Image (cartoon, rainbow, N blue to C red):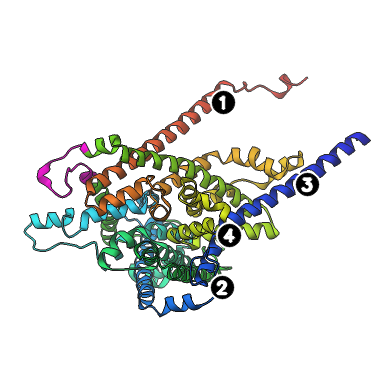
Amino acid sequence: MTASDFERDRRASIRRSLTGGFGWTVFLAALTLVFVYPVSMIAIGAFRDGLPSDDLPFTIGGLVAAFQDPETWKTMGNSLLLVVVCGTISVAGGGLFAWIAANTNVPGRRLLTPLMAVNLFVPPLFHTLGWIMLGNPQNGLLNQFGRMLGMHGPIMNIQSWGGLFLLMSLGYMPFAYLLMLGAFKNRDQSLDEAAAISGAGAVRTFFTITIPSVGPAITGAAILIAVLVFQSFDSPQLIGRQANIFVFSTQIFHYVRDQAPAEYTKAFALSLVLIVLVLLLFLAQRWILRGRSFTTLTGKTSRREPQELGPVRWVLSALIVVFLLLNLILPLFAMILGSLQPIFGVVSTGLTFDNYVQMLTDPEFSSSLGLTAWLAVIGGFGSIAVALLTTYVTARRTGFIRSYTSFSVWIPWALPGIVLALAYMFAVLYVPAFRGLYGTAFLMTLVLIVATIPVSSRIAEGALAQLSPELEEAGRTSGAGSWRVLLTIVLRLVVPSFLSGWFLSALFIAGNLSVPMLLAPPGLQPVSLTAFQQFLQGNMSQGAALFMIILVAAMAVLALAAGSMKLAAVLRARAGRSGRAPSVPLTRITP
């Protein structure tokens, strides 16, 4: 190497170091501004007897007054009751189905994983509205069916504690299933065989051998489900409030939007309590699962033969059918039928596509559909892009940058959408330079992106876990910096996962209700908020038609993407076969 080459390499190294340092500074500043700073508004608001933007001294008076209000304690009691009941049912049901899918010979067990995946990625608002159309006491389809059979009174009242327990337990069961499925698959089934040889029946083996062997997975799932129930807004808002049932998220919304003047101090106090509770649950999960293994290690290969259950397997197979009916088929049927009725619940009016025509031609509804499509495409892309970047930094960096990034992107896990929206609303109002963002589509899009980061991060983690760091090391050895490696190597290799994350994040954004409830600009309402208002006004058929249009459009995009990927794979395979060199001895092609 000549002196000029050495000097050129030295200058390039200095340039990469300077630009890399500047890039990391900008990255950390952006994390602070987007993720950390808005949450500080919750703490400021809780310890000020007024708005965070007001120039008032810090005090605990407002916080004390909030906890002297009996409604605060009633809300906490309702929230804890909902967490305990729904968490128990969800974890028990999800664990049972995970055991069926992983360890038994129950007919239909192979349908469970795709069924749970489909349910997981259908927006919660869809399930909620579907069940309202099924079980509302006035004109719900199930209650109409009961009257046709001569029954007096409603079969069910979805707008009650029982309805809330049923709907939310069914909604979170897929989460519990997927969290525990791996543990049931990896456990050593020879323990069950030993129990059977000793004379234990299937039920006794399940409770004395199977359940204890997957204890860490059950504990982790229970804590995460508790966090999700604490954060829930759609079902408690649409169902619980009709029965005067308030939980953390709906009570916070009540303080901000239903009171005149708004009781922001109480809203911030409840938000702070919720953040602390969720933080404690996450810390408990990490402490309990630290160093624990979800698999049973043995010195020899474990047998994977399914457990024979005898006649009981048909009962469990029937449970799978019941779950399919309750969590997918019945709500979907109600939405489809309701969208085709001129007046929901009035069978004599017949079926028509007029609701769909109105949704697509009326300027108010068509603009709502267009806005939702825009939010889904832009927000979904932004969510998976940010998730991929932050997950890459967390996985590949060390020290302060890794810890701070992990802490920053954890924040959306701890905040329900309604609290997140409240935090960002006052974050922009607190700084005069940012006040112009209030009431804009940009702010709503930004908060929707942040709210879906937990979903897109899981997809990004799975994609990056498949990449060997050696590929990135080779890029750095050739002189590429960290950002160039990310854009030219990592991003190209995770394109399929990136597209999947984009699609799923877009679905969640399209069905998000809590963020638009506080941040939707005047005249710009996405489908979730428009459908919610239509249901409140009694126009259930129009609200159902709106959601069905979004669902059909999403399925069309998914089918198009799947077909395009399959076609690309076929073309690559054909190109590989046509360009393949003939098999000849090495001596024939070497000089």
Tell me how far mark 3 sits from mark 2, CA to CA. Answer: 44 Å
Tell me how far mark 3 sits from mark 4, CA to CA. Answer: 27 Å
Q: Secondary structure at mark 1?
A: helix
- Give the magenta-colored segment's residue range: 336-354
- Residue 324 shows in this picture: no
Q: Is residue 37 left or right of residue 348?
A: right
Tell me how far mark 1 sits from mark 2, CA to CA. Answer: 71 Å
Residue 576 numbered mark, or none = 1
Quadrant assignment for the N terminus: top right
Tell me how far mark 4 sits from mark 1, CA to CA. Answer: 49 Å
Please give the residue where the numbered disc 3 appears in the rendered image: 17
Q: Is residue 413 magenta?
A: no
Please give the residue where the numbered disc 4 appears in the rendered image: 36
Q: Earlier in the sequence, mark 3 or mark 2?
A: 3
Q: Secondary structure at mark 4?
A: helix
Disc 1 crowd, CA 10 A, few/some/many (<14, 14-19, 20+) = few
